[in-house]
Image (cartoon, helix red, strand yellow):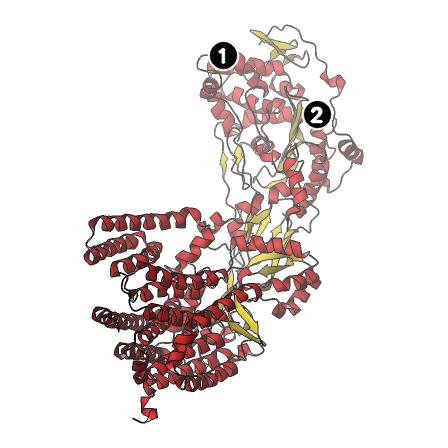
Amino acid sequence: MSWYRQIDWITFLTWLFISVIGLVAIYSATQGPLHQGTNIQGNFTKQLLYICIGIVILIILHFTAPRTFQQVSYLGYGFALLLSITTIFLGVEVSGEKNWLPVFGFRLQTSEFLKVATILAVANFLTSRRENQAGTFRTAVTATLMLFIPVVLIIIQSDTGTALVFMALIPIMLLWSGVPYGLCLLMVSPVIIGYLTVIDYVWGLLAAVIITATFFFLEKRPLLTFGTFFASIIIVIGVQVGLHDVLQPHQRSRIEAFANPALDPRGAGWNVMQAKTAIGSGGIYGKGFMQGTQTQLRFLPEQSTDFIFCVIGEEGGLISTSLVLILLGLLLMRLLGQAAAHKHPFAQLFIVGASSIYLIHVVINLGSAMGLMPVIGLPLPFLSYGGSSFLANTIMLGICMNFFYHQRDFSIYS
Amino acid sequence: MRNKSSQIRSTVSIRVLQVVVGITFIILLGRVIQLQLIEYDTYSPISQRNSIRQEFISPARGLVYDRHGKLIIDNQPTFTITITPINFNRESIPLLSNITGYTPEEIEERLLTARRYSWHRSSRLFTEVSFEVFSKIQENLWRMPGIGHQIEGIRNYPATVNGSHIFGYLREVNLNEIERNPSYRLGDKAGRSGIEQTYEDFLRGEVGTQYVTVNAFGQEINQFDAGRHNEPPLKGSDVHTSIDLELQTLAEELMRGKVGGLVAMDPGTGGILALVSSPDFDINMLAGRIDAEYWRQVNSDSLTPLFNRAITSIQPPGSTFKPIMGLIGMELNIITPQTTVFCNGGYYRGRLYRCTAEHGNQNLEQSIKNSCNTYYFWMMNHIAQRGGINVWKNMVDDFGLGDRTGIDIPNETRGIIPDSSYFNRAFGVNRWGIGDLINLGVGQGAMGASPLQMAVATSVIANGGYRVQPHIVSSISHADGSSEFNSTIKERIEWIKPGPLSLVQRGMRAAVTDGSGRFYANLTDVEVAGKTGTAQNPHGENHGWFIAYAPYDDPKIAIAVLIEQGGYGSTSAAPIAGLLMEQFFYGEIRRPWIIDQVIRRPPAPSASAAASTPTIQTITD
C-alpha cells in the first residue's frame, strides 16, 4: 500500500474544513468597521499562521514512531505539570483567568498542553500494566489522581472550564481501568444531580431516582443502593440550601440566569441572551458574511473565541451551523471508529481520551452559546481563535492520525 | 495481550461513546433548528432592537407660578457622569480621578456602590459636575469604557420665596416605587412633600424615547431612520398656584426666628395666598445632591424644620374660637342678640373659671370685642346641658375644625374637637363631666386646631357661611396647551344665618378697632375684623393666636397666625397679620417700625397684659 493511502484523509480534510470555517468567522468577528484599532484585529492573521503551523505539525507527527509517545508520556506529563506550576507564579492574568505563561514574547496557555500530556500519561499508565490492570482499586485511584492533580492546578489558575474538562475525563478514563460500571456512575452522579437541582429540585430528585435505579440494576446491592439514594437526596438538599442561604443574591442570580435568561436581559443573563439572539436571528440562510448586527455591533462578548459559534449562526444561518455540527460530529465518529478498529489498547485509549476532550469542549461551548447550560468559557475546538488551544488540539489530532498511520507497526511493540 | 473480556469491554465502551456522541450532536442540531427555524421570529426582532436601542429622555418637570403668573420654580440643567461596572476598567480610575478631581479611593468606593446595585446597569457616578469636567469626560469617553454622561434637570428656585413647606422637595425614587410604577426608572426623582408630591403625576411629564443605532459600548452611531420613530418627551404640566409671591416673601421674613405657622387665604375661593411654617429649611439645599451635613442638621434640629406647623401643629385655638361659639350659641337658642352675661372676673361652676378682667354686663358683640371668658364659660355650660357635647362638636366641625380640610399638600392633621366618645376613650366612660367641657367654650382644654383649620374657620365667618376647601394650586396647564382648574368644594353651611353672622362679624370688627387687636391690626384705609387668642401651654410660654379677615364688608383675605410660645396673641401674632394685610392691600408696608419690632424682638409676654385678679364669680343673665 502506498504511503499516502495510509494517511487518514477524511480526518485531515474535516480538520482543514472546520479550521477554515473558523478562520472565516474570526475574520468577520474581528475585521468589521467597529473593530478597527482594537486589540483583537490581529486575531485573523495570527489564526491563519496557527493553521499553517498546524499543517506542519500534522506532517511532522506522521514521521514520528508511535512508540515515542509512550516513551515520553511520563516525562511530558511531568514537564507539563511543571509548566502549570510556573504559570501559577509567573502567569499573566487575562480576563480573570491567570493561565497564560509568557514565553519568548508569546503567551502560552499551559493548561491546553497539559491536556495532551495528561491523556498520554494516563493512557500509558492504564495500558502498560497488563497483568494487574483488571479491576484493581489501586490502579483506579492512581489514574484518578493523575487526572486530579491538573484539576487542582487549573482551579488555582481560576480556569473553571478547563478544570471541568479534566473532571469529566475522570469517569471516562476510569471505564478503561476496569472499575465496575456502577462505581463510575456513582462518580458522575453528584454533578448530574447537582446541575439538575439548580434548574429545579424536581429534576434533581428525578435524576436521583433514575441513577439509583440504574445503579441497582448494575450492581444488585440493595444496601449500597439505598446509601446511593440517601446521598443523592443530601446533594439535592445541599444544593438547594447552598443556592438560597449560602450564596449571595447576585451570585445566585448568575447561576439561575441560565435557567431563565429572559428574566433580566441586561443583567446576569446578558451574554446568554445576546448569544441566543445572535444564533436565532440568523434564520436559515443567515444575515450574510460581515452583515450580522449582533457580531458587527459587538453585542456578542468574546465573539472570536468562546462565542464564535454565534458569529457562524448569525451570519451563516442554519446552513452553516448544521454544516459545522455535521463536520464536528463526523470528526468525532471517525476518530472513535478508528479507535474501535485499532488493536493496541494504548492507541485506543489515547484516541478515546482525545475524542472525549473534543466532545466535552463542544458540549460546553455550544451548550453555553445556545443557552443549554451556564456560560463557561471554553473554546470550540479548531474554530475558536487561540493559538494554544488550536495547536494543542491539533497536536492531539496529529497523534491520533499517527496511530492510524502506523497501525501495523504496533504489533511489534506488543 | 489483554484478556478477551477486557478487549470486548473496551470495544463496547467505544460503541457506547459513539452513541453518546451521536445523541449529543442530534440534541445540538435540534437546538440549532429550534433557535434558527422555530424561534427565528422571536430572536429576529430582539436583534433589531439591539442594534437600534431605545433610549429614554427625561421630560422637563412642570414649572410653578404664583397667582400673578410670576415664576416660582423652574429647572436648571446639571451634568451627570454614569458608570456601568461590567464595562468599566479599573485602569481608567487615574484618568477619571484626574478629570473629576475626586480621589481614586472615592471613585473606588462609588464603583463599589454602583456594583452593589447592578453590574450591568448604569448608575450615577457623579452628579452635578461642572461643565468643564463634563466636557473633558466627553472628550475622553472612548478611553474610559463603561463611563457615560447625561444631562439632567434639577429644581431651581429663582423667586425670593423659600416656600419649602408649600412646594416640597424631590428625592430619588426607591426600588419599591419603581416596581409599583413602571414609568419610573432608577435615579428618577419624585416629589416627597408639598405640591411636588401631590401633583407629582402632572409635574413629572412623560418620558420620551429615541431610537439610536449603538454599539455594545453604548456609543451612539446615529439616529435610527433619521429619527422618524422618536417620541419627544412630554414636558410636565405647569402648575399655577394661588400663592401671592410678595405676601409669601413677607410672611416668611416675619416668621423667621419664631416657631409657629401662618396661613393666609382667599375666603371666597379657599385659594392659599401664603403659608409659612417656621422654622423651615432651605429648599435650595435639597434641590440637587444633598449636603449630608445640612440634611443631618435639619433632621436633628429639636425645632423640627421638616414639620409643617401650618397644617400639622395642633394647639387649642383659645379666644379665636369665641366667634364660632357665638354662632353656635345663637343657633342653639342659648343666646339672643340681647342676652347679656354679667362678668365679675370669672365663672363658678364647681370651681372658678377665670376671666381676664371684670367686664360687667356683656352681650355677644361686646364679649367678642373684650374677649370675655365668663360669657363663653356660661354659654358652654348651657350648650353642654341643653344640646350636648356631640351636637356642639358637629357644629364646630362644620367650620373645618376636627377634620382634614382637604388642602392639596400631604400630611395634614385632623385636629381635635372632642365628642362624648372622645372623652370616653380619654378618661373612661362616666369619668368625665361638665367640668371638662366648660373650658372648651373659650377654645381651651381637650381641643386643638392647626393654623390652616383656623384660617378656614375665619373664611367661613368672613364669606357669609360658606365652607371652602383650601388649596395651593388653582389651575394646571398641560403641555398640549389645554388647562384644567382645580375643582374644590365650596358649600353653604345651612344653619349659619345672616343675622347672627353679622353680629359676630361686628364683634370681630370691634375687637380690631377697640379690642385687643387695635394696637397692630387696625389699618387706616381697610376695615379689618379679627380676634386674638392665647392658648394655655402647660409646658411653657403660652401660644399666641390671631385670626383676621379684611375688608370687613367684602373679604378678600383671611389670615390665621399661630406663634408657639409667643405669649399673647395680640402682641405676637396680631402684628404679623397686620403687616400682611398692609402688604396685601397697599402693596407696601406703611408701618415699618412694626417690622422692626416683629423681626428684632421675638415676642415676649408683656407683664401688664397678664395681670388678672381671680375672684369668685356670680353669674347673671
Whole-percent x, y for residue B132 in the image: 71, 63
Residue B532 vs A405, above or below: the answer is above
Q: Which chain carries label 2?
A: B
Quarter occupied by the C terminus of chain B: top right
Write down the quadrant of residue A219 in the picture: bottom left
Q: Is mark 1 on a helix, strand or loop?
A: loop
On what subunit does the disc labeled 1 rest?
A: B
Q: Can residue A389 be seen in this view?
A: yes
Helix, strand or loop at disc 2?
helix
The mark nearer the N terminus, 2 or 1, is 1
Left-right relation of A371 to A386: left
Q: Which of A79 and B245 is in front in this view?
A: A79
Residue type of the residue flagged with mark 1: Gly
Residues indicated by labels 2 and 1 sit on the same polypeptide chain: yes
User: Residue at position x 64%, y 61% from top?
Assistant: B93
Q: Residues within 10 Å of mark 2 (few under 14, many from 20)?
A: many
Q: Is residue A301 left or right of residue B98?
A: left
Amino acid carrying label 2: it is: Ser
Residue A69 in the image: x percent, y percent?
A: 40, 77
The label on residue B570 is 2
Pick the residue in front: B602 or A269. Answer: A269
Q: Looking at the picture, how far across and down is residue B496, in whole percent? A: 51, 27
Report whether A204 appears left or right of B208.
left
**Marks 2, 1: nearer the viewer:** 1
Q: Can residue B517 be seen in this view?
A: no
- Mark seen at residue A228: none
Q: In this view, does A131 lie above or below B338?
A: below
The residue where tag 1 is placed is: B433
Q: Where residue B489 sits: x, y (%)?
A: 49, 39
